[in-house]
Image (cartoon, rainbow, N blue to C red):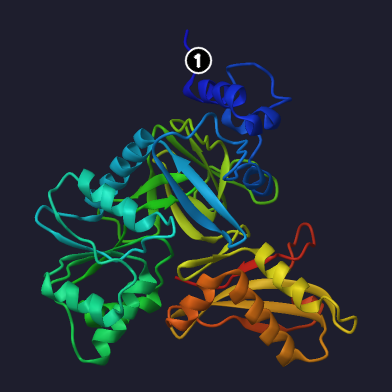
Amino acid sequence: MSASPLAELVDFARRNSPYYRDLYADLPTDRDRRLEDLPVIDHAGFWAANTARDNRVLTGRHTEGVVFRTGGTTANPKLTLYTRSELAAMAGLWADGYVAAGLRAGDRVANLFYAGEMYASFLFNGLALQEAAPPVVHLPVGGAPSPEVTAEMMAEHEATVVLSTPTTLVRVAAHLASRGASLPSVRLFLFAGEAFHDDQRPVIAKAFPHAAVRSLGYASVDAGVLAAPVEGGADVRVHRVHGPHKVLEILDEDTGEPVREPGRPGLLVATDLVRRLMPVIRYPVGDVAAWVDHDDRTFRLLGRSEKGARVGPVTVYPEDLRAVVEAAVSGDPDRLITGMQAVQRRRDAKDELVLRIAGDITDPERFAAAVRARLDALRPLFGEAVGAGMINPLSVEYVPLERLRVNPRSGKIVRLVDERTN
């Protein structure tokens, strides 16, 4: 009897990937293993091994396909590699999400995602549109033009559907609204890359009065395409897992045990039973979710986990903030930091990242300015997004140590708190 797809994948990864060989060194050779018997990937170790040179995660040479760049610092960007066949299969799955979200034959689709610098969104959506079942017209506008130019191109070419991050479309909508203009031809806004919040609906509705808002699907550059929007669903955060080759688990944040009951939050962990060049086996995606129906494989996204703060189109990791704070206090013995915590909020219909600092700061305003400057140097995209009006500037708060939120079970400071509501 042949081995299960999981057993074949694990054996292949262990034979061909130095990283997985080390990770599974103590794993029994029993081929009837369960997914929950495998270790969950540690991000730090995985990305330390998954480098542009001397890569220890890959199972072979990368001779055809694509390299995408995902989140991380400019000094240590994260790279994700796909073969040509893997990319084509993933684009086909993403195209299925278009159909579930309401794409129709004859639509004129304005693609406002970002291109260049090895980012995936614009290129990948362009590929997926070629795979879409209904024939459509692709309008490759991109994310670089100003809101004014973007609106002009959408109007000139009578766009009926928009693909974009919510932040980008809100900028275009605000531009139109400020001039008393609207684009009634747009009937559908399909978003990805960040969460959509209810406070964004009014400005979008004013500029695009006939546009329904739907999710494009659930995916990440590193873990790939994972789930599709639920056809006809009213909740844009509910998705259905692409089975049977994509496996999503929801794990208890404290115990690591699988969660199966509906409504109970946990960490999303992904496994791809098809990818072979860069295997993804029990990889934490970085989001918190809860099952709507475990048997139906539908789940609802609840926000980001501690792995990274998604602020508009930019991902900032707790390690980034730790680095800028340590740099700001270095060489000054009068500054004593006793704790820090990142908080995600919404203010004035924009994402805001708040850095809470507990400790003895002799010159709070100067320290805050130094932290902001170092974050902009470390993550230039953050400063660019602030300058473009897409997100709020970094806010620095000084609080007593006891005001930092802690895990009620472990007593540890929660590094990243998401206070946004949909």
> Residue at left 47%, top 83%?
387
Considering every residue shown, the one lying at the far right of the view is 333
Q: Position of residue 421 (x, y in %)?
A: 49, 72
Answer above or below: position of 409 versus 162: above
> Residue at left 36%, top 64%?
114
Q: Position of residue 413 (x, y in %)?
A: 75, 66
Q: Is residue 380 left or right of residue 335?
A: left
Give the class, few, some or many, for how many residues have Cα within 10 Å of label 1's Cα (few <14, many ≥20): few
Q: Position of residue 414 (x, y in %)?
A: 71, 65
Q: Is residue 271 left or right of residue 334?
A: left
Q: Is residue 211 visible?
A: yes
Classify residue 233 by image quadrant: bottom left
Q: Is residue 92 left or right of residue 48?
A: left
Residue on which the image places disc 1: 3
Answer above or below: position of 197 versus 135: below
**In front here: 184 or 77?**
77
Amino acid type of the residue that numbered disc 1 sits on in the rendered structure: Ala
**In front here: 100 or 135?**
135
Q: Which corner quadrant holds the C terminus?
A: bottom left
Q: Tag 1, which secondary structure?
A: loop
Q: Is residue 38 visible?
A: no
Considering every residue shown, the one lying at the far top of the view is 1
The number of discs equals 1
